[in-house]
Image: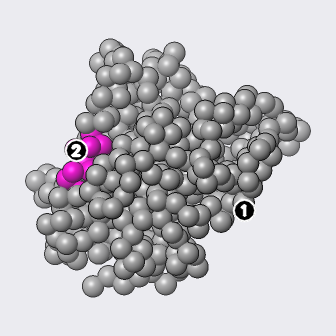
Amino acid sequence: MSTAPQDEFNPRLNAEYQFNAAADHLQLDAGVREVLRRPDREMTVTIPVLMDNGKLHCFTGYRVQHNFTRGPCKGGIRFDLKVDLEEVRALAAWMTWKCAIVDIPFGGAKGGVECDPKVLSTGELERITRRYTATIMDILGPDRDVPAPDVGTNDQTMAWIMDTYSMHVRQASTAVVTGKPLALGGSKGRREATGRGLMIAMREALKTMKGMPDKVRVAVQGAGNVGAIGALLMHQAGHKIVALSDERGAIHDPKGLDLVAVTKWLDDQGRQPKDKRKFLDSYPATQLVPKEKLLEIDCDVLAPCAIENQIHSGNVERIKARLIVEGANGPTTSLADKALDERGIVVVPDILANAGGVTVSYFEWVQDRMGYFWPEAEVNQRLEEKIVGSFEEVHATAKKNNVSLRRAAYILALDRVASAYKLRGLFA
């Protein structure tokens, strides 16, 4: 049987723990289990870049393609100082299960460059992106591996990747990445997709819980695309956002934050030069709390939308929410997840709750390939159908097997990928 990882904060070990627990439940064949546990391909590259000061600096980049069984690989690229191979391996595996949960024809991948985008100029970021793309170019392509934005990257980063790839293949190839600007084949609704999926997943989970009010108090960790947009959409649905945090601090108002004003303030800061941007610790007329304390605020729903390993054995007993909806990848360690389950706290896992982004990325890829683009209302309606249907399948699996939503999600995902692998057979 699977045992909890000794290193609680190693994302790959946490991913393997969840995988093994579901594989044990399914009594998965040992050989198939070994195939699905391992990445299909890993690449580590050196990225030499001429910096603005005229000096040459080498960055390290990664791309892990976890599984090709159900289709091309799909997964984001992050620029962050904490990027390493263990993290990228875990994120790639989570992408495989995420795509299987929402039943889209992709496998999982993930990539990253070890750098701090906050201190790099636009020119330096472009040169890093283009050299990284050129170096891993042989494993990319609309039918091979389709990247998307992640932590520290955005639609401009995707435009540079798309252009670099297109110049090498000598034709415009819009379907090689998703999360692009609309003018280059991006999809309407893509920017809001992960936050919208988070809101839908929360709504569906609340329907299954007894004793929860119709309009709940929500604390949101993370004020990026996922957290800020998800919080605004929850606010517009009538829920009360009592706290929101970013990398510097958190703002708290038990009566509910004015999310329209907060979102406008965040958008205004995003348009400022890097050296003039302000963070939430300088937002006026609210109570400030340390960012790590947001997780422990009195609320009905907690939405961790920042980075991995935020809820752990050191703080899990102080969590007051009855429902956790994971907007980030891997925000809860396996030890903490077990403790939450024992306390009866419902967790909508990341591979379901934040699947809105990859779902609309799939829609963007489809639109690029057929050269016809849908109205935003149609994108949102298709996303709604996917998330609602996926939640219902995961919830039914949980009830049938008397397990948590996370265990049910992994059982469902592994079963789909394993079934496809068995049907394809082994090429020899």
Q: Relative to the observer, which residue lies in front, 285 or 198?
A: 285
Residue at 55% x, 75% y: name it: 318
The residue stretch that appears in magenta? 386-394
- Does the rendering let one see residue 298? yes
The residue labelled by disc 1 is 290
Q: Relative to the observer, which residue lies in front, 75 or 67?
A: 75
- Does the rendering let one see residue 80? no
Is residue 175 within the magenta segment?
A: no
Question: Residue 361 falls in which quadrant of the image?
Answer: top left
* Residue density around tag 1, few if under 14, some if 14–19, many if 20 or more, within 10 Å: few
Residue at 16% x, 70% y: name it: 401
* Residue type at numbered disc 2: Gly
Magenta segment, prevailing SS (helix, strand or loop): helix
Q: Which mark is residue 32?
A: none
Q: Which mark is residue 389?
A: 2
Q: Relative to the observer, which residue lies in front, 312 or 106?
A: 312
225 sits left or right of 365 in the view: right
* Residue type at numbered disc 1: Pro
